[in-house]
Structures are given as C-alpha cells and as structure tokens.
C-alpha cells in the first residue's frame, strides 16, 4: 500500500547532510546507522528515512504503538522502529516479513535496553503487508531442507543474508587483489566444446531432445503424409512438368509459360515438404525423433552442429588471453555433473581462475598464497560483524580459523613428502582411504595435514602425472607434474593449480595418452605452435572459500544445486541464472529465438527422491542443520 507516491526531501535537511544515504533510493542504509563504532548513539536527533523488512514486531501500551525490528540486508543488525497507532494500522506492520518504508527521528532509547539508538516514526511512506497465517518463514529456527523449498525467500534469514554479504565482500576483494597486481579481468564462455578436466563429468547442452518433442507434438496435431500422398504429389509434379514442356514446344506466349512454370515450382515445393515431413515421421518412429547416423546421435543436426557442454572450467580459454596479455583472470560459473553428496560438492559453483605468463610453479604458489591470505584479511577488515554472527551461530571457530589463515605462512611439501607423512601417521591411526604413492589425496588426508600435522594451510605440489590433467607441465623425472593444491583446515583442497605444459610435442602426446581426441584441442595446441610461453595458473572454488567459514556448502549459494535437489526450485531458474544447475530443462536465448534445451543427466536423477528422503531423515534424527533467522 502506498501512502505517498513520491516521498519529498526531508524537511530542511538533505540525506547527505544527515547520514550517508543509499544511492538512488532516497533512504539511509541501516548499516550506516548501526555500523558506526558507537552503534548509532551519536546520531540521536537526526532525521532519517529507512526501509526494510520486519524481523519481529509487537504492539505495546494497549495498542497505542508498536515495536518493530527492521532489517534491510545492509548489515546483520536490526534497527528498532517505533510506530504510533495514529500513523498506521498497527496490525498491518507487526507481522514478520512486512516491508516498511518510513521516516522519523533517531532517538536514544531508555537506559537498560540493549539498543543504542532507535527510530521514532513520524511518517509512513510505504507498507508491503504480509498475511501472517500464510507467510512461510516463521520466527523459529529453520532447517536447510525447509529453506530449499522456499529458496526464493531464504535470503531473508540472517544466515543466508550474512553469506550473501560475505560472498559480495569476497568477490569485491577478488577484483581488488588482481586489479591491484596488474591482472586484466577477462570473460570466458559458459558453453564450450572442450573438456578442461578430461573427466567426462559434464552437463551437455542440446536442443535435439526438445526439437524431437516439438516434432512429436507437431506430427500428432498434423499427421504426416502417407506413401500414397507422396505418389499423388509426384504425379502432380510430372503432369505440371509435361504441361510446361508442351507449352514450350508449341511456342506458347511468354505469359502462359511463366504461369505454368510457377505452378510446377509450387508443386515441387509441396512435394519437397511432403518428403521432409515423411522423413521426419520415419525418424520419429525409429529413434524418438532424435537424428542418428551409423547408430549414434548425429550432432551435426544439433544447435551448435557438434556436442556442446556447460564449462567445467574457464582455464583453457583464459590461457589464450594470458598468452597475449600476460596476467589475466576470469571469475564466473562452472558446472560439474558429479553425482556426489559430500560437504564439498555442488553441481554449479563459481571459480576464480588467474593465469600468469612467464611464471613457473613457484610463482603460481606465491600468487595463490597471497590471494587467499588477502581474502581472509579482507573479511576481517570489512565483514567483521557478519563473521561474528557466523562464529556465534554457525561455527564457533570461524573467526579464529580466518585469522589463522590470514596470518600464517603456508607450509609447502611435495606430494611425495606428504604421502610419507601420511604413511607414518597411518601406523598410529586408521584412514578410511589407503595411503600409498600414486593415490589422489582424499579429504581425510588433506585435513590431517592441515588440522593435525601442520595446524595451518599447506601447499602440496609435484603430483603423480597419472592422476593429473593433460595440460600440466611434466617434470624432469617424467613421473610427476608441476601441479599444486592449496589445502586449508576444515575444507581440504581450496585451490588447484599448475604450471602449464608449454612444449607442443609433449602436450600433444599427453592428450593422446589421456585418450582424448586431438581435434577439439587443436586451438589449444596452437598456443604452443605459435609463440609458446611458460605460464601457470590456478582455480579457486569460490564456494570452498566460503565453506572455510562454516559447515554447510549449501549455504554458500543463493540457489544451491546438488544431484536430485533441483526439484525444490518452485520457480524455473534457468541456465543463464547460473545459480541454477542440475535442472533437466534449461533455456537458451539466441537472437530472437527461444530455444528450449535439455541437459542430459541420466546419472543424476536415479534414486533422487530416496537420497533426499534419507538426508531429511538423518538430519531430523541428529537435530542438525538449524539456521538462525
């Protein structure tokens, strides 16, 4: 309900003169009031306009006024707002979730209360009412499972809004760090034909299935021609052709010949359409409308005329820029079709991927360490209130861990040294995963190194060639590659990186040894053919960085996606909404056409409901997963 259609300026006082205002919305962010060192106490007597959502509200003094706790998302704290009954119907403003836009005077509250400042409303500008009986977010603590069913509202909870502010701070810090060090920000494609990891765990992007469904529907509505229909059309073409031939032979007038040729052309076009529809109908009968060649799907008929996927990494593409612009980074969404339900895996997540020309593995490790420490210090300097909230309600060691990573020198050990440490530890403790040279370190191994052995971040480098990607620089021993992982307490692997193989012949052979086709990587090999350069880079999983701060990876994302759980999304988030993966149906805009595409995920939907039900049952039994509002 709008009380005033266009709020005028404050009487005799501009917002800029009063307190720092929000740009473009004629209001003061609550953060600029409560975020001061005195928690706003020094602003008493100032007139302000604020807007936000009611966290909790109650009527007082027999309905003469109401106390509202209002939050606008700018900080974790709520501003106490007092509304008198003569200004507005109190029952319409006290419900949790109500949006209020009000103007009033900041006042010092009575002694003995926790607030240092409160707002006494003088004018109600707007109210967005809520039906309290239907509002899906009660004032109690809420489970993550519950919030996934109201994902469009979960940002109103204290936990998710805190994570959003932390994500924002980390993104800002990322750009600040790389821009400060002379890197250029470049954009890499989301749809690609290359598999950076070579693991095959990719979401496929195709219009073939939707086109097949469209064809099936069309053929039901407009039955295809029969063989007799085609024969009849062929006869018409023959007859029209004979008419044209006779007219030309008889040297008929130009007008007669032109008219006859036009009729022949029309008959041929009709026959061609009938043939095409007949072929489509036959294809639909044989293969469900999916084009095939030699028993395999014919991707030449697909939207991109070849197989295409959602990117698992922008690394290969960002290398093209590094080999021309020297120091670059990309920061965007990546997708993995890993049917995993661990605390560290999402189907869609964001990656920060810098690439540095003229840099070796040591330079790469130096950059990675400096970047991670910078991020942690940035949160301590700019998000301390949110980190205090996370420490109080989510993970009591969050602040301590953040400070430790920010101030610690990262230990560096080779993979061989790390395995030796783990083998020694295995004599006194039991690991679920066997320790031997050549394994890919499991999460328990990584956490042992960081949490028990070194009690600090660790960089493990020079991994076995057999377990790493084709593009990594082969070391002189021909057994290991110049790869490195940054491991941090509680999370394990935070960063993976390497020096890239710059030798054309070696890289080509590595691609072949991995069983990958050369053709999709010819452009990548060109970087080695033409002016090859030593270069290195790494990728940081953005959600992993946030996971460093709390226990649950599904809190890291505004719309978390894991196998079998996109059913929770009651609104159809699509591929370009990047925070929505694992969805079988996506939409791709191209020009003026809207192409409905499907991501083929046969492995992800098997037993999805059973998995979800089991998880819900386990969480209920353990009493975990409660999110403070």
Image (spheres, rainbow, N blue to C red):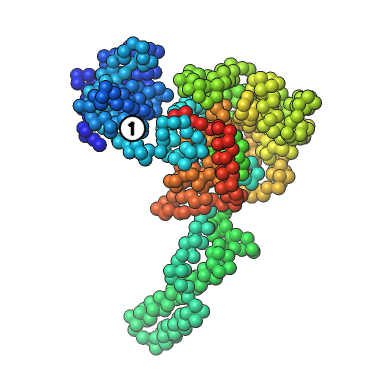
Report x, y in % for residue 292: 59, 63
Residue placed most toward the observer, 54 or 42: 54
Quarter occupied by the N terminus: top left
Report x, y in % for residue 588: 46, 50
Residue placed most toward the observer, 251 or 279: 279
Report x, y in % for residue 205: 54, 50
Q: Residues within 10 Å of mark 1 (few under 14, many from 20)?
A: many
Residue 156 visible in the current orientation: yes
Residue placed most toward the observer, 540 or 186: 540
Q: Is residue 287 above or below residue 488?
A: below
Quarter occupied by the C terminus: top left
Secondary element under disc 1, as helix, strand or loop, is: loop
5 left or right, relative to 357: left
Q: Residue reaching furthest front? A: 62
* Quadrant of res 511: top right
Identify the residue at horizontal 35%, vertical 19% (top origin). Answer: 33
Instruction: Report which residue position mark 1 lands on.
Output: 95
Residue placed most toward the observer, 243 or 84: 84
Q: Residue reaching furthest bottom? A: 250
Report x, y in % for residue 151: 45, 39
Identify the residue at horizontal 57%, vertical 24% (top origin). Answer: 372
Q: Is residue 321 above or below residue 286?
A: above
* Quadrant of res 399: top right
Q: Is residue 297 above or below residue 470?
A: below
Identify the residue at horizontal 69%, vertical 37% (top origin). Answer: 468
């Amino acid at each position: 309900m709008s009380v005033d259609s266009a709020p005028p300026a404050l009487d005799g006082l501009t917002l800029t003169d009063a307190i720092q205002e929000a740009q473009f919305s004629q209001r003061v962010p609550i953060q600029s009031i409560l975020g001061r060192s005195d928690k706003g106490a020094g602003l008493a007597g100032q007139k302000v306009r604020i807007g936000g959502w009611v966290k909790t509200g109650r009527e007082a003094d027999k309905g003469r006024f109401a106390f509202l706790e209002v939050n606008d998302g700018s900080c974790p704290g709520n501003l106490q707002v007092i509304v008198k009954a003569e200004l507005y119907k109190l029952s319409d403003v006290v419900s949790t979730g109500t949006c209020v836009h009000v103007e009033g005077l900041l006042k010092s509250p009575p002694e003995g209360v926790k607030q240092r400042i409160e707002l006494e409303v003088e004018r109600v500008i707007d109210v967005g009412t809520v039906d309290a009986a239907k509002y899906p977010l009660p004032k109690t603590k809420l489970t993550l499972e519950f919030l996934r069913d109201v994902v469009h509202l979960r940002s109103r909870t204290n936990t998710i809004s805190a994570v959003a502010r932390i994500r924002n701070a980390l993104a800002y810090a990322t750009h600040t760090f790389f821009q400060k060090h002379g890197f250029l920000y470049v954009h890499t494609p989301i749809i690609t034909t290359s598999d950076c990891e070579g693991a095959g765990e990719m979401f496929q992007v195709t219009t073939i299935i939707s086109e097949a469904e469209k064809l099936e529907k069309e053929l039901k509505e407009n039955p295809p021609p029969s063989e007799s229909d085609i024969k009849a059309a062929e006869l018409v073409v023959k007859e029209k052709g004979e008419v044209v031939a006779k007219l030309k032979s008889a040297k008929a007038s130009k007008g007669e010949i032109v008219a006859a040729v036009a009729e022949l052309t029309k008959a041929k076009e009709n026959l061609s359409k009938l043939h095409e529809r007949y072929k489509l109908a036959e294809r639909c009968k044989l293969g469900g409308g999916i084009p095939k060649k030699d028993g395999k799907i014919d991707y030449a008929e697909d939207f991109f005329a070849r197989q295409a996927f959602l990117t698992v990494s922008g690394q290969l593409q960002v290398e093209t820029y590094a080999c021309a612009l020297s120091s670059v980074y990309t920061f965007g969404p990546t997708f993995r079709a890993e049917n995993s339900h661990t605390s560290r895996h999402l189907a869609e997540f964001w990656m920060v991927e810098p690439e540095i020309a003229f840099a070796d593995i040591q330079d790469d490790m130096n950059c990675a360490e400096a970047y991670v420490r910078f991020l942690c210090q940035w949160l301590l300097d700019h998000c301390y209130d949110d980190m205090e909230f996370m420490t109080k309600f989510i993970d009591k060691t969050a602040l301590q861990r953040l400070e430790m990573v920010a101030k610690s020198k990262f230990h560096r050990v080779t993979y061989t040294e790390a395995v030796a440490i783990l083998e020694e530890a295995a004599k006194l403790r039991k690991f679920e995963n066997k320790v031997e040279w050549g394994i890919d370190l499991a999460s328990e191994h990584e956490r042992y190194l960081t949490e028990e052995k070194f009690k600090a971040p660790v960089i493990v480098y020079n991994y076995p060639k057999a377990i790493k990607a084709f593009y990594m620089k082969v070391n002189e021993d021909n057994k290991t590659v110049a790869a490195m992982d940054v491991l941090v307490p509680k999370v394990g692997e935070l960063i993976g990186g390497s020096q890239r193989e710059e030798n054309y012949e070696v890289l080509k052979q590595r691609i072949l040894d991995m069983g990958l086709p050369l053709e999709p990587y010819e452009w990548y090999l060109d970087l080695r053919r033409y002016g090859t350069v030593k270069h290195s880079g790494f990728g940081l999983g953005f959600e992993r960085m946030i996971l460093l701060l709390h226990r649950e990876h599904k809190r890291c994302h505004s719309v978390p996606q894991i196998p079998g759980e996109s059913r929770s999304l009651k609104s159809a988030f699509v591929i370009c909404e990047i925070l929505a993966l694992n969805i079988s149906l996506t939409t791709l805009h191209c020009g003026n056409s809207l192409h409905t595409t499907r991501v083929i995920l046969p492995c992800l939907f098997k037993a999805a409901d059973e998995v979800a039900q089991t998880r819900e049952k386990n969480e209920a039994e353990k009493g975990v997963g409660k999110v403070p509002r």
